[in-house]
Amino acid sequence: MSDLKIPDESLRPALEALSLKDPDMASAYRECGLPPVRSQDPGFDGLIRMIISQQVSVQSARAILARLLGQVGEITPENILALDDEGMKAAGLSRPKQRYARGLASDVSEGRLNLDQLAELPDDDVIENLIQVKGVGRWTCEVYLLFALQRQDVMPAADLALQEGMKHLKGLKDRPSAKEMYELSEAWRPYRSAGARFLWHYYHHAGVA
């Protein structure tokens, strides 16, 4: 993902609308301002990057990605399938992630998953297609919808940073569960993607993370 430290002006209308709906959001938005520009190209490369980023720090994910690119040059289904176990291990991919990467590559190369078609489908249908892939859970589906397909009303509710951000935003005693995240963000429709983007920004703001 590109992570440029410049404000994402495209989020301003949605965050201003959310600030009118939610006083807590209004206060935090005044304090933190717009989140930085962040996006991910759709397709196989983007999904592999999301699989790499599961349950590791941003720094670790970047290091693994750099080593993987050093091994394959370009992240394509053919190149991933051609990379042997030693190459995967040298890149830093765990055994489960090696299986997930190869499984996704097989699904795409053999036509079981048409990534180009996803942009034309409603959110729920995108999730239904992606979640069939081993190693792709709801979090990955929702992050793909948000950053790769640029959908406007998505909340990756299982994300721990978002949960921590919501806990601080709402002054909660405990970090909310995924179910509670969906409930808490229901009032943010149809701007939940902007809300999620802001929660990541808020979480990394001084004094929250």
Image: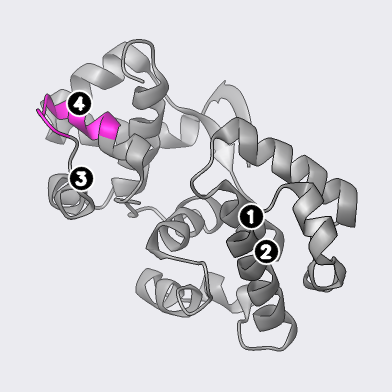
Asked if the residues shown at circle 1 and circle 2 are in contact, with their CB atoms under 8 angstroms apart, the answer is: yes
Q: Which residue is mark 1?
A: 94
Residue 2 visible in the current orientation? no
Residue 109 vs 177, above or below: the answer is below
Q: CA distance from mark 1 to mark 2?
A: 6 Å
Residue 195 vs 190, above or below: the answer is above
Please give the name of the residue rendered at 36% of the width and 45% of the height, measured from the top-left corner.
159
- Mark 2 nearby-residue class (10 Å; few <14, some 14–19, many ≥20): many
What element does badge 4 sit on? helix
Q: Nearer the viewer, residue 177 or 141?
A: 177
Indicate the amino acid at tag 2. Answer: Gln
What element does badge 3 sit on? helix
Asked if the residues shown at circle 1 and circle 4 are in contact, with their CB atoms under 8 angstroms apart, the answer is: no
Q: Magenta stretch?
A: 164-174
Q: Which residue is mark 4?
A: 169
Query: Nearer the N terminus, badge 1 or badge 4?
Result: 1
Q: Nearer the viewer, mark 3 or mark 4?
A: 4
* Disc number for residue 188: 3
Q: Nearer the viewer, mark 2 or mark 4?
A: 2
What element does badge 1 sit on? loop
- Mark 1 nearby-residue class (10 Å; few <14, some 14–19, many ≥20): few
Please give the name of the residue rendered at 68% of the width and 53% of the height, measured from the top-left corner.
93
Q: CA distance from mark 2 to mark 4?
A: 37 Å
Query: Nearer the N terminus, badge 2 or badge 3?
Result: 2
Q: Find residue 2 and report its horizontal and vertical position in percent.
A: 65, 37
Please give the name of the residue rendered at 13% of the width and 35% of the height, measured from the top-left corner.
21
Q: CA distance from mark 1 to mark 4?
A: 34 Å
- Mark 4 nearby-residue class (10 Å; few <14, some 14–19, many ≥20): some
Query: Nearer the N terminus, badge 1 or badge 3?
Result: 1
What element does badge 2 sit on? helix
Query: Nearer the N terminus, badge 2 or badge 4?
Result: 2
Question: Which quadrant holds residue 111?
Answer: bottom right
